[in-house]
Amino acid sequence: MDLLSIAGIAIALAMDSFSVSIAAGMIIERPGPRHYFRLAFHFGLFQFLMPIIGYLGGIFVESLIRDYDHWIAMALLTLIGIKMIRDSFLPEDAGIPRTDPSRGWTLVLLSIATSIDALAVGFGIGVLGKPILLPSVIIGVVCALFSLVGVALGKKAGELLGKRVLRLGGIILIAIGARIVIEHLG
């Protein structure tokens, strides 16, 4: 597998993480280095690990989730999106903290949802009998870089849009989930 093919696959796989990072950058109040790091690290790590898991799991794992992976990703993104939209209607002084997608289970669920496709890529690489480590490293690094850029773009958009960004971020996550399902069904 040549580097150009691997780079193309890495960029395609990074698009969901990039979009989610933009949404995260919009809704996090004043994203700092920790937010950038956590999002880029986790999205990159999961994008790195999923092809390896797919490669190692081979037919067993892929056959179990092949028919449902897009639904799983959509459900996770939709649940998080709905929570963000709901939180956007709470008054600022409600005592309920604003959702921070760079922390806790939200971050883990977003990382899984945006990297499920990489599982199938790992399976495909295994079927081709090609090595998995270099493609996985490239996929993870590209995803991490795209995530950093996404948070920065989202931060700028958040500064322009104010409080409405929480609703917009939730809508974006739901739209990404819908797009994943449409692409898999089409």
Image (spheres, rainbow, N blue to C red):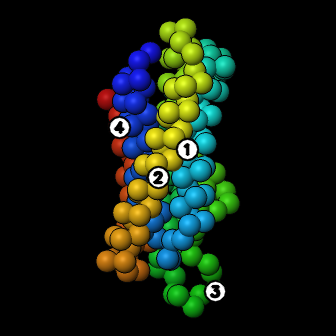
Q: Circle 4 sits on which residue?
A: 182
Sooner in the amino-acid sequence: mark 3 or mark 1: 1
Question: Within 10 Å of the Cα at label 3, are there few (<14), some (14-19), or many (20+) other Cα atoms?
Answer: few
- Closer mark to the observer between disc 2 and disc 4: 2
**Are the residues flagged by discs 1 and 2 in contact, CB closer than 8 Å?**
yes
**Are the residues flagged by discs 1 and 4 in contact, CB closer than 8 Å?**
no
Q: Circle 3 sits on which residue?
A: 95
Which amino acid type is marked by label 2? Ser
- In the image, residue 72 lies at what x, y percent? 54, 40
Q: Which residue occupies 38% across, 35% down?
A: 12
Q: Is residue 85 visible?
A: no
Q: Circle 1 sits on which residue?
A: 44
Q: Is residue 166 above or below residue 147?
A: below
Sooner in the amino-acid sequence: mark 1 or mark 4: 1
Sooner in the amino-acid sequence: mark 4 or mark 3: 3
* Mark 2 residue element: helix
Q: Which residue occupies 53% across, 12% down?
A: 130
Which amino acid type is marked by label 3? Gly
Q: CA distance from mark 1 to mark 4?
A: 24 Å
